[in-house]
Image (tube, rainbow, N blue to C red):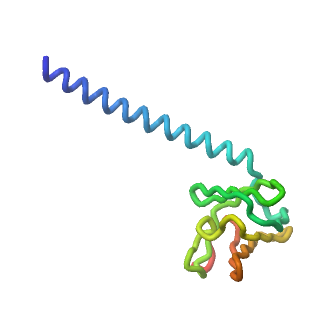
Amino acid sequence: MNENMKILGIIFSVIFIIALAVYFTVEDSQRIKKLHIEYKSVSSADELNGKVQNLYTEKGACFVTLLGEKKISIAPSGNYAYKEVYLSRVISIGDKIIKEQESDTLIVFKKESEYKFVIGKIINK
């Protein structure tokens, strides 16, 4: 009887852990979907010129609120020409970002430095 209780306890524990993993995976997926609905994805047709007022990064993507409440999402981007390769590690609140219309290049201005990224791509590898 004691052996059966141990086996039932182990089975219950494993099922509980699997259920928690599934729950948190689904929750995370729904949260990310909501972000992509709230923040407009930047395309080459868009023009950007603004100061970063708020910022959230998730799995390399940047969810940015520009001064004036414009909300945009920027696909994971990187440039091996810099010590910090990924845009999500470079960009911060207070930075100025510029992107010309019909261009896929995003420029981030930090104090006296300038960082260039191609949206959705890794360059200079």
Quadrant occupied by the C terminus: bottom right
What is the quadrant of residue 59 in the picture? bottom right
The outermost residue toward the top is 1
Tell me where residue 116 appears, x and y as whole percent. Answer: 70, 76
Figure quadrant of the N terminus: top left
Q: Give residue 82's quadrant in the image.
A: bottom right
Q: In which quarter of the image is residue 81?
A: bottom right
| The furthest residue to the left | 2
Looking at the image, how many numbered discs can be counted on the residues?
Answer: 0
> Does 98 sit above or below residue 58?
below
Q: Along the line of sight, which residue is nearer the eye, 52 or 117?
A: 52
Where does residue 120 sit, x and y in percent of width and height?
67, 64
Q: Is residue 12 left or right of residue 5?
A: right
Q: Is residue 125 above or below residue 120?
A: below
Q: Position of residue 21 (x, y in %)?
A: 44, 38
In the figure, 107 relative to 48: above or below? below
Which percent across, then down, holds residue 35?
A: 68, 47
In the foreground, 71 or 16: 71
Vertically, is 114 above or below 12? below
**Residue visible at 74% across and 46% down in the picture:** 38
The residue at 80%/70% (across/down) is: 99
**Residue in front for this viewpoint, 96 or 8:** 96
Q: Which residue corresponds to the image point at 72% horizontal and 70% vertical from the top-left?
A: 95
Q: Is residue 36 left or right of residue 80?
A: right
Left or right, 29 with respect to 105, comes to left
Residue shown at the point (51%, 41%) measured from the top left: 25
